[in-house]
Image: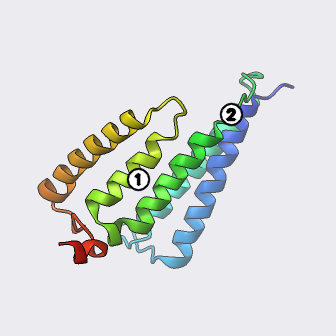
Amino acid sequence: MLINKKDGAAGLFFVAVGLLYGGIAWSTLPFGSALRMGPGYFPIVLSGILVVLGAVIFGRSFFSGPGMPFGIVPWRGLLMILLATVIFAAFIDDLGMIPGLFVTTLVATLARPQTTIGRALGASIGITAFCTLVFSFAVRLPIPVVGPVFDGLR
């Protein structure tokens, strides 16, 4: 029997992520009930759906044929996107919306090896301007436009 290794790996990955986040939500957040949902209700339900979908994808991998080989893993892209997410989460409160988004977008655009510095800067400026207008001024998220790190410069 030939299994589709990509589908099998993806299914197991979804099951693992669903179990991990479901377990974290179950142990740290109150669940509540369907009529009085607690903060853990939605993450636990989503984690359960992810586990079920992962199991279905994994089960389907036994019947869908061998599929395509894995190929080359784009490590640079994977690491840059992960780094951009960590930078945003770690520094958004201290840097504020504009510098935090700019640095995050700049790092994320460098995930593609063919991206030039000019395009990366242009994309970073454009995305930062758009997101600042939408989230800071239109939606009024409680994130400072410029963070406390820059208080001495004002």
* Residue beneath the point at 55% across and 50% down: 50
* Residue beneath the point at 42% across and 37% down: 117
Where 30 sits versus 75, above or below?
below
Estimate the x, y position of residue 94 in percent, counting from the top left: 34, 72
Residue, disc 2: 7
Q: Amino acid at mark 1?
A: Thr
Q: Quadrant of residue 35?
A: bottom left
Q: Nearer the viewer, residue 146 or 150?
A: 150
Estimate the x, y position of residue 14 in percent, counting from the top left: 62, 48
Quadrant of the drawing holding the N terminus: top right
* Residue beneath the point at 33% across and 44% down: 124
Where 11 sits versus 154, above or below?
above
Q: Is residue 14 left or right of residue 128?
A: right
* Residue beneath the point at 41% across and 74% down: 32
Distance from label 2 to label 1 (Cα)?
31 Å
Q: How many marks?
A: 2
Q: Quadrant of residue 151?
A: bottom left
| Mark linked to residue 120 | none
Q: Is residue 152 left or right of residue 116?
A: left
* Coloring applied to the structure: rainbow
Marks 2/1 in contact by CB < 8 Å: the verdict is: no
Q: Nearer the viewer, residue 81 or 47?
A: 81
| Mark linked to residue 104 | 1
- Judged from the image, the secondary structure of the residue bearing numbered disc 2 is helix
Q: Is residue 126 visible?
A: yes
Q: Amino acid at mark 2?
A: Asp
Estimate the x, y position of residue 38 in percent, counting from the top left: 38, 73
Circle 1 Cα neighbour tier, 10 Å, few/some/many (<14 / 14–19 / ≥20) = many
